[in-house]
Amino acid sequence: MATVLDILSWVLLTLGGVSVLIGGIGALRMPDLYTRMHAASVTDSMGAILVLTGIMLQAGWSLVTIKLIAILLFLLLTSPTSSNALASAALLAGTRPFAETQQDREDVT
Amino acid sequence: MYYVVSIATLVTMGLALVRAVLGPSVYDRVLAVNMFGTKTVLLLSVIAFLFGRPDFLDLALAYALINFIGVLAVLEFFRNRSLRRRAEQGEGQ
């Protein structure tokens, strides 16, 4: 049973590390703000869930697990909120999505 | 195994810092800093188990709170500034 839990948590931790890395590369290479936010949200949701669940399986039932669940719940509550605030602030400041600006340029010319 | 996750998180934090330095607009930088903070929480949780010191989880929790409040405060500041600029432009016309 312990071996099964170990293997499961290793798989979750590796998948979490891979998705965190993919999100980081995406946030560096995507062409505009909104697609960058899309890439960064992968690390916020997928990476955090996988890594923290993998750690939880290693920790077993104790106070540590409760703290990990609190961290996970807090991340899941706050990262959509800050993403929404960021997108609305950027939209209000006049940042337009990439595809739409291309369309506007075609309309002007 | 913890080493792999912490190295991946550290590389992602480096990429987020590059984006924060390059980022054309203010919002790209805010996004990068927000991402950096979330990755710090993950890294602290992993390091707590890597070195066998569960006290670090409290630091991770506190850092998550501070990061969230900080990002919201910065965004509110820039939102007010863009609204004020728009109002000034409206008066100019």
Image (tube, rainbow, N blue to C red):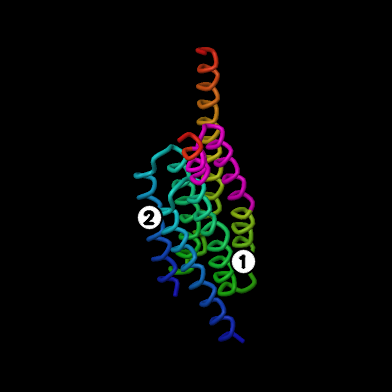
First to last magenta residue range: A77-104
Query: Given the image, on which type of amino acid does mark 2 rest?
Result: Leu
The dot on residue B15 is 2
Q: Separation of disc 1 and disc 2 at Cα?
A: 30 Å
Picture coordinates of residue B49 (x, y %)?
Answer: 48, 68
Residue holding disc 1:
A65
Picture coordinates of residue A76 (x, y %)?
Answer: 62, 55
In the depicted view, which residue is nearer to us: B14 or B89?
B89
For the N terminus of chain A, which image quadrant? bottom right
Picture coordinates of residue A19 (x, y %)?
Answer: 49, 65
Picture coordinates of residue A32 (x, y %)?
Answer: 46, 46
Q: Left of B22 or right of it: where is A62?
A: right
Give the farthest residue toward the front.
A109
Query: Given the image, on which type of amino acid does mark 1 rest?
Result: Thr
Helix, strand or loop status at disc 1: helix
**Is residue A60 located in the magenta-colored stretch of the structure?**
no
Chain under numbered label 2: B
